[in-house]
Amino acid sequence: ARNVLDRAVQLLPRVDFLWYKYVFMEEMVGDVPKCRAVFDRWMDWMPDDNAWMSYARFEGRCGHWDQAKEIMKRYANAYPSSKSFMRFAKWAEYEAKDVDLARTVYESALVELEPEESRQARVFGRFAAFEERQGEYERARVIYKHATKLLHLGQEGTQPPREEEVSKWEQEKRNELYKAYISFEKKRGDKAGIEDIVITSQRAEYEKRVHADPQDYDAWFEYAKMEEENDIEGVDNTSKVREVYERAIANVPPSMEEKQLWKRYIYLWIYYALYEELQQHDLDRASKIYDACIDLIPHSKFSFSKIWINAAKLHIRRKDLVSARKLLGKAIGLCGKERIFTEYIALELALGEVDRCRALYTNYLKQMPHNCRAWSKYADLEKSVGETERCRAIFELAVSQSALDMPEMLWKNYIDFEIEEGEGDNVRALFERLLEKTGHVKVWISFAQFEGTEVGKGVATARDTFQRAHDQMKEAGLKEERVLLLDAWR
């Protein structure tokens, strides 16, 4: 095996898989010097990072930590980059358990690497996180401050020097680093001392964005969210949050045709109302916000069911059932969407108002007679209150509609209902009516399987049904359908 692998790595020295097999074999047989020699030969070919890490871990498993550290130093010297130094430092901290070495590696990364490598945000971020894990909070603070000055973090309107081109990915990392600095100060520093630095810089950034584009609703969302978080953390910031929301909702979309833009805009109102309800516990103010939003929407062009439903549910939480019903009734008139009906019906059903549910279903089906789901739910309602005849009448009315969106679901529910009631003759009649509309093989199979049940007439009738289906399909020349039928028959 050794001879084969030795020859293989000589012929294909760039195939790491062979080297891994070679060192694995030597380690498995316990020949540590030979394994080390193979690793040294491999390292002469300057393999990738994982090969160096494997060598160092091998020495660690053998208990030779000094040699492992020397290997990692060779690795860092061979590949002088932020990636190699970060892996070296992580290895020193977690595997070698040498905190001083890890700190030295981080410091070397900042000093020895080229500026394009050492000035990466992730180098400072990992160094600071390392010091924080070790309880060296002052060291971590110094690192964060140094990074803030060097990388121009959190400075609104400040662009990096012209000679320094910052990629989009690096800019995102710098933003994350500044957020980590803020989070660190909130945990370890004096909140009063950093409030102006953190909040003011963020406000300036958002002000710049919303002034550049008042219809940038994402910026308004983030701005308001930032003020809300500041309010939650113990600072009485209610007036500032309300000011941001009021300024945001004042920027009405200029065009009535851009519904997607209106959708984003409406969510500003919803978030504003939720803030007043959940954080300020001011239900009356939240209700007024919903009312103002409803009055603003051009319902002749389009409407939004979510705003109606949220407003109605708020009335219910205020224990004002009359206002909730009036609002939902108004919503049916102006909006008339399916979700309005379903939510209104769910409300009345929870209150046990069956007659109101019937009236709502009647209006629902007048507007959407093609909606099979609505017909089925209406029938389920009548079945749940024991009105079998009403349920049957609803199903009859439903299947007689000229246009349905999912007729197969409706027929199936009707047939299942009659089977549950034990009305075999009705089920048989339904199948015959359905077969007049469609001769689909699945309908024939279901019909035959029904006849074989307790409600049906028995196995003989089921066999006759299968035979009828087979004869008709044979006449029509439907070969694939006959195969499915015979599989079910068998």
Image: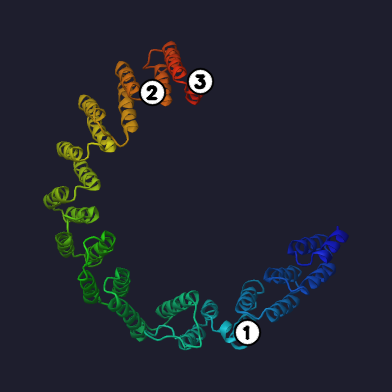
Sequence-wise, which precedes: disc 1 or disc 2?
1
- Counting every numbered tag in the picture gives 3
Give me the residue at 51% from left, 79% from top. 121
Q: Residue at x 47, y 23 (%)?
A: 478
Q: Work out how far the residue at label 1 is from the one at label 3, CA to CA, in angstroms.
A: 78 Å
Query: Residue farthest to the right?
Result: 3
Relative image position of residue 329 (x, y in whole percent): 14, 48
Out of 92 and 330, give the one closest to the viewer.
Answer: 330
Q: Which residue is mark 3?
A: 486
Q: Amino acid at mark 2?
A: Gly
Res. 104 mark? 1
Q: Earlier in the sequence, mark 3 or mark 2?
A: 2
* Residues at circles 3 and 2 in contact by the CB criterion of under 8 Å: no
Circle 2 residue = 439
Q: Picture coordinates of residue 465 (x, y %)? A: 42, 15
For the residues labelled 1 and 3, say whether their Cβ atoms are less than 8 Å apart: no
